[in-house]
Image: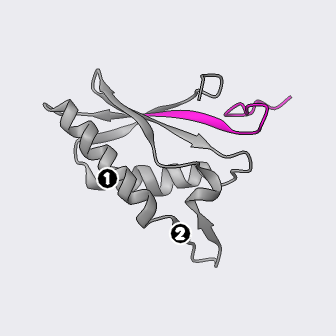
Amino acid sequence: MVARFPRRRPDGTFVVEVTVEATTSTPEDLVARFGDWAQRWVYENAQWHWPSGRHLNYFDDFVGPPREIKFGRGRLSFRLDGKADAKWWKDWLAFRLLREAQIAFPELGRLEGIVDRSEASP
């Protein structure tokens, strides 16, 4: 049997926690700025037009912006709630959200990991 990541809840939804290296002397400020930026970014970039002609909508894959943003031990982490029929969530995360966050925040480094949190309470 092929392993599936992330595991889906009975209703098909899922939650992933994304962790990125971060260097800052003001963690609370970074968390607040990232949270504000993520809120704006999601709504300003909800439409993604690929050169192939494909059109994607962020809200077809995710319930909302990143949530539960926190900083600890040199890492910034946040959670994303995925919808049951999400197909392009990895592309949104890797090629849009993370890439643009790393440009907007020089404090952010490489991706540390993506952890399945689907079994955690919503």
Amino acid type, callout 1? Trp
Alpha carbons under labels 1 and 2: distance apart: 17 Å
Which segment is the magenta one?
1-19
Residue under label 1, please give it: 37
Amino acid type, callout 2? Gln
In the foreground, 33 or 49: 33
Residue 111 location, quadrant: top left
Tell me which secondary structure the magenta stretch mostly adopts.
loop
Question: Any magenta on residue 13?
Answer: yes
Residue under label 2, please give it: 47
Residue at 59% across, 26% down:
117
Residue at 73% across, 31% down:
9
Residue 78 relative to residue 107: left or right: right
In the foreground, 95 or 16: 16
Task: Count residues near mark 2 (Cα–Cα under 10 Å), then give few for <14, some for 14-19, many for 20+.
Answer: few
Residue 42 location, quadrant: bottom left
Kind of element beneath mark 2: strand
